[in-house]
Image (cartoon, rainbow, N blue to C red):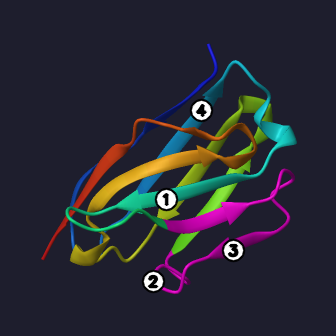
Amino acid sequence: QVQLVESGGGSVQSGGSLRLSCTAHGFTFSYYNVRWGRQAPEKERELVATSTPTGRTTTYSDSVKGRFTISRDNAANTVYLHMDNLKPEDTAIYYCNAPDWNLWGRGTQVTVSS
């Protein structure tokens, strides 16, 4: 079954760090672009980070630039989102996306308290 499975969410205090993981099942991740998005309550989904298949080119939204890092371990069919200096406004459900497959994971909750 083709799917994306996220993990690594949790609750942290402001200034803390978390690392999210996204593992692809049923297809080889290394051939495709990958993105992380998030959705806070009553807000639209926002793309925060993207990576090309090799990981050589990455982009970030202004809201996370300098604090979040997207990386990938293609041998493990896994993509990561390392989040530093977390802020309460980062609280959201975080989703992994493979746009070439039009595929989203089910998400993992991140909660940042002040």
Dot 3 amino acid type:
Thr
Q: Cα distance, mark 4 to mark 3?
A: 20 Å
Q: Residues within 10 Å of mark 3 (few under 14, many from 20)?
A: some
Instruction: Check residue 50 for magenta coloring.
Output: yes
Q: Cα distance, mark 1 to mark 4?
A: 15 Å
Ranked by sequence position, the earlier of labels 1 and 4 is: 4
Q: Secondary structure at mark 2?
A: loop
Dot 2 amino acid type:
Ser
Q: Quadrant of residue 57 in the image?
A: bottom right
Residue bearing mark 2: 63
Ranked by sequence position, the earlier of labels 2 and 4 is: 4
Q: Is residue 46 left or right of residue 98?
A: left
Span colored in magenta? 47-67
Residue bearing mark 1: 37
Residue for point 33% across, 73% down? 86
Residue bearing mark 4: 23
- Determine if residue 28 is in view: yes
Q: Cα distance, mark 1 to mark 3?
A: 12 Å
x%, y% of residue 17? 37, 64
| Mark seen at residue 59 | 3
Query: In which quadrant is the C terminus drawn?
Result: bottom left
Ranked by sequence position, the earlier of labels 1 and 3 is: 1
